[in-house]
Amino acid sequence: MAQRPVSLSYPTERLGTWLYEPVGSWMRVLRFAAITLVMASSPATYDRTMRRVAARQIYLSAWQALPGFALACVVVGFVLMRIIIGTAHEYGFSQYAVELTVRWLVLELFPLLAALFVALRSGAAICARVALMHTHGELDAVGRPGSDALRHCLVPRAIGSAVAVAALTAFGCALALGLAYEATYGLSPWGVGQFLRISGQVLGPVMVLGLALKTLLFGLAVAAIPITTALSIPREPGFVPLALRRAMMRLALALVTLEIAFLGVMYA
Amino acid sequence: MPEPSRIAEEEGGTASDRGVEFKATLLLVLTLALVVAFAGYVLYARGTFESTRRLVLMASNSEGVSVGADLTFSGFPVGRVKRIDLAPNGQARIEIDIPEKDVRWLRSNSVFTLERGLVGGARLRAFTGDLDDAPLPDGAVRPVLRGDTTDELPELIANTNRVLANIERMTAADSSLNASIASARALVQRMTGDRGALSALLGSDEEAAKVLVAVERANRLLATLDRLATRVDALTQQAAGTLEKADARVFGDGGLLDETRRTAAQLTALLEDARGTLKKIDAVLVEAQRVGANAGDASEDLAALRAEVETSLRRAGRLIDEIDRKWPFPRDTELRLP
């Protein structure tokens, strides 16, 4: 058995490797997200195969998830709104109940819920599938000139996931506005004017732009992190579960970080 | 050996794929419609499509006011803060958009207040006393009256502290209130004594006894005065009888008044006689004056004569002196003292 040569630089190398790996993996995430963004904004990307793969991804991630997501939104939103409105009435802050519900459900909770829904439902599946393709060498051509692997396999899935996050967020926000109105005024039409005014106050230009940017970043995170994590493992089938675990952890970390950053910028 | 390429699988199309594509497209269209509707909803909710008038409120402090805050009238929002900046005179300039449909609630005489509660943002309120007054012109500038609960808190707490300190001083063992209560207790004890309230008022039983003696004396004096008044009444009656008699004597027929009238008539006749006599005396006096004037003229001649005599006498005197000097006769000129 050959003895490992003693080297004074061994701890330094370990430290460099320990620092390099996370930074490198996040850099790969950013690079893939940039590629996805650029290709998504280029009309030449959308050939027939790419459209079919992207449509299938949207179907799997958003269409099939929509009933479950709507049910989850209704249940969670209803419970939270009852808590918020009841507490506001109890402490004499009824005038702020609508503002609180709109602010928390439309701007904060449902976008995050949509991203988590797509990440848990499709992100894990995409990660496993890409990891398997990677271990089988089917994606070797990725990055080579003239290769269609990136355009026909990875980017459509990423675009599909991002679009799914945006679609579920849009449905969730519409549902949240309806639920907030019903919880506050019931089915009476006389509260429409006041509800419009209060929600108009909450949904200022900065808040709406922040919501759009947050949704885009959530979509890119859900799209890029599972794919890049799957591509970063050694080509052995035994590493596929590891890729899944890493992808989910990184995704959760990224979503929480984005949400905290958004809260900090908007409310600090 | 890798499996047959999944990418190649995905490049093939099936009937089910076309259904998937349709659903995905439908979802995309719905999502886009929702996004557009959401944008329209936000723009409408923020009053972008409303025709508005501008109202400018000048406040000493705009703390708590935010862009988008409501201006309320009778609890209903009639305007929305559009912009807040600092005016050249150092005041806060709050620009408010009033929708045309709500302009009628604001008149030239409207008053605007800015109130800050303990919780929440500041509240802008409008009060209109006369809704028939002239409408508020576009771009009108009005001052804002501030009613700040938190501003009044320090003063309220200071007043409360003062009241509590006063109560503490009042309830202290050596406080004026306690001394007053003790004095009141002593007063009540005296009032329940033999001399009653009189002793409490005068401070001692001796003084109260003196007052009682004085009261008895006063009673006796009053009895004497009563008797005196009875006598005075009798005297008054006698005087009235006397007056009646005097009246008959003076003013009755043949009374003193008639006698006086007759005497006056006689006096008038006497005065007429006296006036005639005086006229005669006047004539006599005129004559006497004439005689007097003649006597005056005679007196002037006598004076001239007298002057001449005196001159002759002085000459005779000087002649005698001359003779005495020139003809000496013995004379005794020596002065002898006694």
Image (cartoon, rainbow, N blue to C red):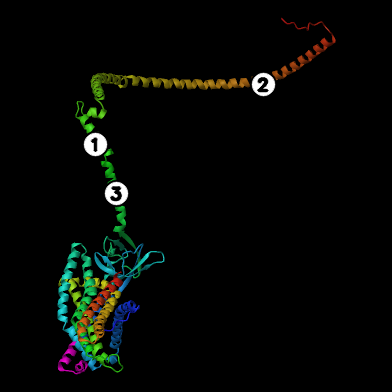
Residue A265: which numbered mark, if any?
none
Residue A206 place in picture, x, y as percent: 30, 75
Residue B161: which numbered mark, if any?
3
* Chain that bears disc 3: B
Which residues are the magenta region? Answer: B1-25
- Residue A143 located within the stretch drawn in magenta: no
Residue shown at 22%/33% (left/top)?
B185
Q: Which residue is mark 1?
A: B181
Q: Which residue is mark 2?
A: B297
Circle 1 Cα neighbour tier, 10 Å, few/some/many (<14 / 14–19 / ≥20): few
Q: Choose between B31 and A38: the one closer to the eye.
A: A38
Q: Earlier in the sequence, mark 1 or mark 3?
A: 3
Residue A184 can be seen in this image? no
Amino acid type assigned to the residue bearing label 3 in the image: Asn
Foreground label between 2 and 3: 3
Q: Choose between B323 and A65: the one closer to the eye.
A: A65
Residue A62 can be seen in this image? yes
Q: Earlier in the sequence, mark 2 or mark 3?
A: 3
- Residue B7 located within the stretch drawn in magenta: yes
* Chain that bears disc 2: B
Relative horizontal placement of residue B314, taking residue B228 as reference (left or right): right
* Chain that bears disc 1: B
Q: Choose between B314 and B256: the one closer to the eye.
A: B314
Label 1 element class? helix
Foreground label between 2 and 1: 1
Amino acid type assigned to the residue bearing label 1 in the image: Ile
Give the residue at the far top of this rendering.
B338
